[in-house]
Structures are given as structure tokens and as C-alpha cells.
Image (cartoon, helix red, strand yellow):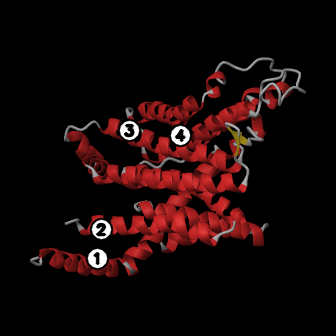
């Protein structure tokens, strides 16, 4: 018989799957459903932060780096798809992206050429953020840099990467980013049907990634990560290599963020440095904090709530929505330090426990009855 916690996880996972795959597609028009699809791409970062920040105590304020890298990898593939010699015959150098032609570049750079392959692009979406996270992790965690210092350093790296992308306009599209992405192997990704398909792909991938994060959290590895968060020195003195565990979980979360970034590019049709820097990185932490940094499901619902509130405020109060967002965050920190998940634990958890216990007892007694 499954434990109570496992039955609760199955129940919550089923509810979330029904909401994402049935309720929202049935209840929203194409425009609103596309917005939700975009929100879900941020949820990949939020669930990674649950494992990285909530479980291990590593607060990264630079997750936009990995989100952006995944997005740029996908954008480079899509841009090459749109830059065939026939489509760019009006340029001085046909066959290269338009922003390269505008910047007097006459040949496709070597690091762009592998992105003609979709298989390589999918590999790069995972590998590039993961490898950069490993480099950062090795440089920081093996020197025992953590806490506030690590958070500030990740912010600095996000700022540096943003400046680098903007400064290399001929190779990255500069401040405008990589735009006008319309087709994936000839498939129009801007049509309503494509948006619906991409929404389902994103939702299913999010559910799969949640299962992966849950597997890590429930394993021995997850217990060691929580021990590192609570008593790092004691774990180190017990013989574990704390740095390697931190590097792993940081790189694992970077891969999640990369997947979200790639899906974001497919959803919105562009990628720019505005999704890489400090502000989006902090917003991603807010999504996790509002939902509850120790709750996988809370992180997803927190992402949806914050982004829905931001869209609503920006539509009705375009001049005040940033203040409204700030007020929402301050209110959550002051009155709900455990995020929205703490509301559930305070008011609903005992009823869910009681319901599942009664249901389990009835199922057990039915199974034990003689035939």
C-alpha cells in the first residue's frame, strides 16, 4: 500500500495535470491559452529553484542566464530556418540572418553552423546551460562560496552576459535579440493550431520535469541535499563531498531552465537579452517564493498566479502595475513567508490527510475481503 505522502503527491499531480491539459484549454480562448503557455515556460525555472533553493539552500539570482541560453539556442536554429538564400536574396550577403547582414558580416560564424541541425539544437538546449552552471558551480562551491555572496555573483554573471549579448550585435542581434522566428522545419509556429500544440508540448514536458525533480527530492540524494541546507558542516564531516552535490543540483536546475527558455522562444517567436538579465532572474525567484520554495506544486501555481496578476495589472493599471506587483510580493513575504503552499498546509492539509486515510482504509478492507 502506498504511503500517505505518495497518495497525496499522486492526487496533486493528477489535479494539476487535469487543470493544465483539460480545464485551461477548454476554458480559455487561443490568446489567453498562449499566455498561459508562456507562463508555464517560467515554471520550469521555478521547479528547479525548489530543488536548488528550497531543498539545498542555494539562492541563485541568475537563473535568467540559463533560461536565456536555452532560448538563444532554439532561436539560432529557428533564425537559420528563416534565413535561406531564397528568403534573404535582397540582402548583400544572402543566406545569413538579417542582423548579421546589417552589421557588415559576410559569412555565417562557425559557432552558428551546428545550429542548422535540430538534433544538435535540442542537445545544446540542455548542454549549454548545464555546462555553464557546472563551470560556475566548480568555481564557487569548491571554494565554499555560498549564501549571499553566491547570490550576488550570479547576479553579476547575469549582468555580464546581458552586456555581452548586447555588445556583440552582429552575432546575437544585440538589444533587439533574435526576432522574426516563424517556422520550425516548415511548420508555421505562429498559427493558432501551432500555439495549441506547443501549449500541450510545454505542459506535458513540465509534468515530466516535475516527476524528475520529485524523484530527486524523494531519493537519498534529496535527503543529503536537505541535510546540506540544514547542517552543511556536519554533512562534510560525515565524509560527503558537499561541493559535488551542490554542483550537480545547480547544473540540474540550469538544464530545467534551459528547457523552459527553448519553449519560451517557440511560444513567443523571439528571444532577447531582456529575458537574461537581473530583473527577469529576480522575477523567477519571486515566482518560486510566492508559490512556496519548498513546494513543487506551489512553485507552478505561484508562477501562474504572479504572471496572471502581472498581465491583469498591466492591462488595467499600466502605470501602476509595477507597484502592484511589488505590493503583492511584500504582502506574501510579510504575511505568507511559506508562500501560497502555507495556506494549504494551514487550512486544507488535515482534511486531505483525513480523506486519503479513509479512502485508503476502504480500499484495503475491500481488497482483504474473501472472494
Q: Earlier in the sequence, mark 1 or mark 2?
A: 2
Q: Classify mark 4: helix, strand or loop.
A: helix
Q: Is residue 73 visible?
A: yes
Residue ID for mark 2: 7
Q: Are marks 3 and 2 in contact (CB under 8 Å)?
A: no
Residue ID for mark 1: 356
Q: Say which residue appears at 41% left-offset and 75% top-offset.
A: 344
Q: Say which residue appears at 74% left-offset and 39% top-offset.
A: 177
Question: Where residue 99 is drawn, which disc sits there?
Answer: none
Residue ID for mark 4: 153
Q: Along the line of sight, which residue is nearer the eye, 79 or 64?
A: 79
Q: Earlier in the sequence, mark 1 or mark 3?
A: 3
The quadrant of the picture occupied by the C terminus is bottom left
The Cα atoms of the two marked residues, 4 and 1, are separated by 45 Å
Q: Is residue 211 left or right of residue 334?
A: left
Q: Say which residue appears at 50% left-offset and 59% top-offset.
A: 288
Q: Earlier in the sequence, mark 3 or mark 4?
A: 4
Q: Are marks 1 and 2 in contact (CB under 8 Å)?
A: yes
Residue ID for mark 3: 248
352 shown above or below 201 = below
Amino acid at each position: 500500500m502506498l504511503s500517505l505522502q505518495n497518495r497525496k503527491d499522486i492526487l496533486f499531480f493528477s489535479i494539476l495535470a487535469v487543470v493544465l491539459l483539460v480545464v485551461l484549454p477548454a476554458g480559455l480562448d487561443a490568446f489567453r491559452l498562449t499566455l498561459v503557455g508562456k507562463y508555464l515556460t517560467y515554471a520550469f525555472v521555478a521547479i528547479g529553484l525548489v530543488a536548488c533553493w528550497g531543498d539545498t539552500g542555494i539562492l541563485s539570482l541568475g537563473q535568467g542566464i540559463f533560461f536565456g541560453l536555452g532560448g538563444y539556442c532554439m532561436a539560432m536554429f529557428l533564425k537559420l530556418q528563416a534565413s535561406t538564400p531564397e528568403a534573404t536574396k535582397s540582402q548583400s550577403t544572402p543566406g545569413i540572418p538579417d542582423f548579421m547582414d546589417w552589421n557588415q558580416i559576410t559569412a555565417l560564424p562557425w559557432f552558428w553552423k551546428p545550429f542548422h541541425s535540430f538534433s544538435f539544437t535540442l542537445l545544446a538546449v540542455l548542454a549549454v546551460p548545464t555546462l555553464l552552471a557546472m563551470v560556475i558551480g566548480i568555481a564557487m562551491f569548491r571554494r565554499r562560496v555560498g549564501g549571499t555572496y553566491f547570490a550576488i555573483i550570479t547576479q553579476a554573471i547575469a549582468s555580464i552576459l546581458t552586456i555581452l549579448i548586447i555588445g556583440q550585435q552582429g552575432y546575437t542581434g544585440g538589444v533587439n535579440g533574435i526576432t522574426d522566428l516563424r517556422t520550425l522545419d516548415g511548420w508555421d509556429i505562429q498559427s493558432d493550431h501551432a500555439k495549441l500544440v506547443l501549449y500541450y508540448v510545454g505542459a506535458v514536458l513540465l509534468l515530466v520535469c516535475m516527476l524528475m525533480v520529485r524523484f530527486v527530492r524523494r531519493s537519498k540524494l534529496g535527503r543529503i541535499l536537505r541535510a546540506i541546507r540544514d547542517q552543511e558542516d556536519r554533512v562534510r564531516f560525515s565524509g560527503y563531498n558537499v561541493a559535488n552535490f551542490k554542483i550537480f543540483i545547480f547544473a540540474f536546475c540550469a538544464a530545467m531552465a534551459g528547457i523552459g527558455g527553448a519553449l519560451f522562444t517557440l511560444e513567443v517567436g523571439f528571444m532577447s537579452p531582456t529575458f537574461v538579465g537581473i530583473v527577469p532572474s529576480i522575477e523567477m525567484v519571486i515566482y518560486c517564493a510566492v508559490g512556496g520554495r519548498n513546494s513543487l506544486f506551489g512553485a507552478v501555481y505561484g508562477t501562474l498566479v504572479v504572471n496572471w496578476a502581472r498581465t491583469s495589472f498591466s492591462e488595467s493599471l499600466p502605470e501602476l502595475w509595477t507597484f502592484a506587483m511589488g505590493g503583492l510580493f511584500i504582502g506574501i513575504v510579510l504575511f505568507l513567508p511559506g508562500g501560497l503552499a502555507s495556506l494549504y498546509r494551514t487550512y486544507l492539509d488535515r482534511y486531505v490527510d483525513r480523506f486519503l486515510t479513509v479512502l485508503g482504509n476502504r480500499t484495503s478492507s475491500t481488497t482483504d475481503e474473501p472472494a
